[in-house]
Image (cartoon, rainbow, N blue to C red):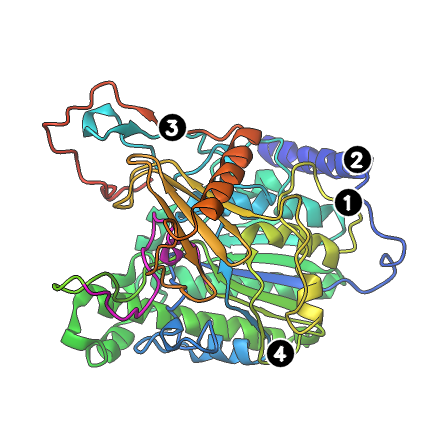
Amino acid sequence: MHVRFRSSLRAACVGITLLIVGIGLSPAEAGEERPNIVLMLSDDQSWSGLSVAMHPDLDYSKSDVVQTPQIAKLASEGMRFSAAYAPAPVCSPTRIALQTGRSPAVLHWTKAGPSVGPAANHKLIGPRNIRAIASDETTIGELLKSAGYRTAHFGKWHLRGGGPGAHGYDVHDGDLGNEHAAKFEDPNPVDIFGMTERAIAFMKASKSEGKPFFVQMSWHALHAPENAMKATLAKYQGLVRGGRSRQVARAAIADDLDTGVGRLLAALDALDLTKTTYVIYTSDNGGGGGGRGRSARGRPRRARGLTGGKGSLSEGGIRVPFIVRGPSVAPNSWCHVPVTGLDLLPTFAAWAGLRRLPKGVEGGDIATLLLNEGKGAVVRPREELVFHFPHYQDERGPQSSILLGSLKLLKCYEDGCLRLYDLSKDPSEQNDLAEEMPEKAAELEARLATYLRSVEAQMPSPNPLYDPDRAPASRKDPPRRR
């Protein structure tokens, strides 16, 4: 009872604070019907991990194996973003960035787990992260709650800080991490269908109260893929080349997730809410790409996917599926303007008719893109997009990247390498232009450094115990549960 009272008191205080700083309803929009918002966030699902393409001209932007007909239907009814980015290449930093509209570099939370220590014998040591959402951060839940929305968060939270109930969510599953997924097997793999049922009940209650709602579905999938439905696993045994168990399980759990998405979308139809609800589908980070690199003779191989994967700032680690369906969004439409998960909070605020944003928000409103056939620009405090991962997890070690226009610079801190790519021509990052365009590489490096200094980003530091004659530990994190 005391915990519930404190949460309610804090929620009331947050609402009052938001109004004091001027985050109120726009007079022009206050009388309009505000849309419902459903945010679906999958876990470790790659840009090319669906059966629907994420780029109209790249055949490798969809899976040849995974079948996701419900998400494909969602895409046909809305807009697909070919250049959408997670704020980080790993889960928790992305999740807190989505909640706050602020980058992991600013929040000093750039890695899901702890950095490797000096004993791992890498040249550098990654910084220590806070790894808990602070009580003074303003979340999407708190922001929309101040605008009269009912709010819910189902599934993986992974941000500590007291859980969703302490950060603006009326209904939630609690402070859940990765370990929760393993508890649920067939017929409710990784709680996909349980989450769906709870969300449907929440939407029904919101409609009966006559209030707009925001619900975040933080799916546990693609974690614990071995828990997929037995029938789905059997289906993919015959579809995955060689029947490799890990690939079979990941394809099967993605298929089961698609079924859960379909049930939730069907419920919106049954409740007559589809026309007044925005639905966003995306992932917390990339899951990997296709073939790449060089042949035995040193010739570049034909790119068959994005380079890199989870824990990498190459495109395979941060470019993610991104689909939006909702009022006035043209069906089967495309947007090629780069967007990021940081843009969700300001976009939701605009839909809710909120006049101002919390201090420090780095994203921009993408609503104009949705209403203008994907054309236009996103107005943010800075023109460039910056990604910062000062840790060991990818083969390149600690790294940062900056995207400005179609040019992307990747900087590695261990060896000082700079790689420059034109993503409009080379999304697979096969052709390094740094030597051909040294002035542009230097310009982007300077802009990257300026941004990181301005937000007091944490940087890797030299390892005082580093022994060049001893092999370092694996850069891949060991399996962890919390």
Q: Which residue is tagged 1?
A: 356
Q: Amino acid at mark 3?
A: Pro
Please name the residue that numbered disc 2 is placed on: 21
Q: Residue at x 28, y 36 (%)?
A: 415
Distance from disc 2 to disc 3, alpha carbons, whole Å, reads: 33 Å
Sequence-wise, the earlier of marks 2 and 3 is: 2
Q: Position of residue 45 (x, y in %)?
A: 38, 61
User: Does any portion of residue 176 appear in the rendered image?
Assistant: no
Q: Residues within 10 Å of mark 1 (few under 14, many from 20)?
A: some
Range of magenta residues: 299-320
Residue picked out by circle 3: 127
What's the mark number on residue 270? 4
Inspect the image, locate mark 1, and give the three-letter code of the amino acid beneath it: Arg
The one nearer the camera, 86 or 386, is: 386
**Residue drawn at point x = 16 percent, y = 69 percent:** 244
Q: CA distance from mark 3 to mark 1?
A: 33 Å
Q: Quadrant of the C terminus?
A: top left
Q: Nearer the viewer, residue 476 or 279?
A: 476
Residue 422 is left or right of residue 480, and the answer is right
**Which amino acid is tagged 4?**
Ala
How many angstroms separate mark 4 from mark 2 (CA)? 39 Å
Q: Earlier in the sequence, mark 1 or mark 4?
A: 4
